[in-house]
Image (spheres, grey):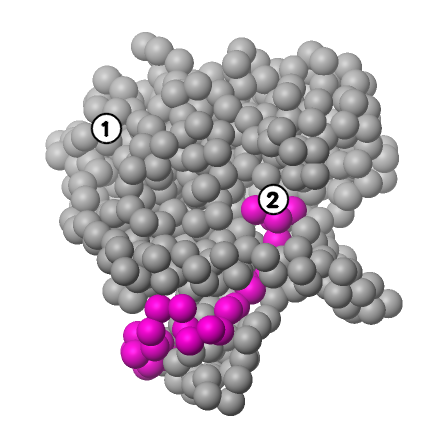
Amino acid sequence: MAIVLGLDIGTSSTKGLLLGTDGEIRATASAAYPLLRPQPGWSEQDPEEWWTACERVVRELLGAARVAPGDVRGIGLSGQMHGSVFLDAAGVSRVREGGRAAAALRPAILWNDQRTGEECAEIERLVGGPRALVELVGNRALTGLTLPKILWLRRHEPHVFRRTAKVLLPKDYIRLRMTGESITDVGDASGYLLLEPESRAWSGRVLRAVDLDPALLPTIVESGAPAGRLTPWAASRLHLEPDLPVAAGSGDNMTGALGAGIVQEGVVLAALGTSGVIYAHSDSPRRDLPADPGVPVGRLQSMCAADGGVRAPGHWCLTGCMLSAGGSLHWCREALFPNESYDRLLAEAAEVPAGSDGLVFLPYLTGERCPHPDPHARGGWIGLTSRHTRGHLVRAVLEGVTFGMSQMLDLVRDVGVPVHAVRIGSGGARSPLWRQLQADVYGCPVALLRTEEGSALGAAMLGGVASGMWPDAAAACRAVVHETDRIEPDRERHELLLRARAVYARLHGDLGPANQILSAREQA
């Protein structure tokens, strides 16, 4: 029996699974760890917690599946993107020499950390402005990305920066512990804000502009390529055989898309978790550079896809993220109806007609990123009257979130990528009402998948590619990913919802001045 192991180093836990050559998942497991909040707006983790979680997860998987260590033929890695692990030369060398120590110089700074606003502005100034940066590396400087964190460390903790020899991402730190290699993949590398998408190489121009030594950065390979082999020490800790190939893997957005079979243009992934993510495959590198000077650039992030390997380089992808998707529904229930089940609330929402009888919800509960990069945006119901019921409030939340997702789909179309069908995942895939609502708003079929394992599944598939189980990522998708149902849009409801969305689309701009005032008072 040939099996591959997939590990996803997430923000709240590490998830793992064992995947067979027949595409069947043999076992799943997870291990949680704490999130550190040392100051308001800061988000950190101890990388040692990730490694300890990996040890626990692998042991649990082997026991649950009742497989021998020799049955595992390869390992694939996925992880939270953009997190920065700072390592000194001695720590890296000890791992390469077979030792176990690779202690980080400080806690890792994570993707959702907000401390780097000044550094983001500095980066864009140094390269010639936001448009110039998007033209170079496909993305604007966002507080979550890696380069701003490196510059923050140089400015605020120079004693740590002077000792730093490598800056690794979370899953790449785990690979260092496994193999002794300092390697990243093209997809995760895109989030450093230092990768040129066309060449799939570090940008010398940006490195020179910010005065950084490229030696700080790991080697880049394709996501499905082998990126080292399991050392005897790591094998003993994980209860696996030494010398197993470890794939480069990718960031969780890329591996989640691979786990949904998104390896060609036209089929897009819509993941409605706490946040809402749109992921679209692209056959060529594309950038969000609207011609209108009044429209922000870089609302979509342009990155490399995780479908390449040793045989051929991969393609590209576009992602957009709205900050409060399923989180809006969770807030609505917890704040207003804490004693009611989601099933009851959604049943009441299902009785309300499309368009919520003129009620519109803005899901900007934590500001917004896409399609409006606006930390001052605020949420709320607009059009509320005494005839609106609890069901109206809940349905308006679902519609408002879905309108935001559809705006990101429109951005994908605007840069030239077609959208023929949408595959859905996370919480938005579990509710029949929300599934149908997505089809009706998007105006195209919405498909359900056999499994929602997502990022860990994509990681395992890349492990299978690196170990020779499948020749490439597309073949892995054909073997593993299967649709179970397709929901067609209702054209009459689609037209009704388009009219409601037109009102929704105006409100961000109309309420912008008021939101600026409210935001200032909130921070006073």
Quadrant for the N terminus, please: top left
Quarter where residue 382 is shown: bottom right
Magenta region, residue range: 344-373
Quarter where residue 455 is shown: top left
Q: Amino acid at mark 2?
A: Trp
Q: Residues within 10 Å of mark 1 (few under 14, many from 20)?
A: many
**Residue 216 in the figure: left or right of residue 435:** right
Q: Residue at x 76, y 60 (%)?
A: 513
Q: Position of residue 160 (x, y in %)?
A: 79, 34
**Residue 34 in the figure: left or right of residue 155:** left
- SS of the residue under disc 2: loop
- Say which residue label 2 marks: 111
Q: Position of residue 184 (x, y in %)?
A: 52, 24
Q: Residue at x 68, y 51 (%)?
A: 374
Q: As rendered, which of 384 and 156 lies closer to the eye?
A: 384
Residue 365 visible, this angle? no
Q: As rendered, which of 105 and 421 lies closer to the eye?
A: 421
- Say which residue label 1 marks: 476
Q: As rendered, which of 387 and 25 lies closer to the eye?
A: 387
Q: Residues within 10 Å of mark 2 (few under 14, many from 20)?
A: many
Q: Amino acid at mark 1?
A: Ala
- SS of the residue under disc 1: helix
Q: Which mark is residue 446?
A: none
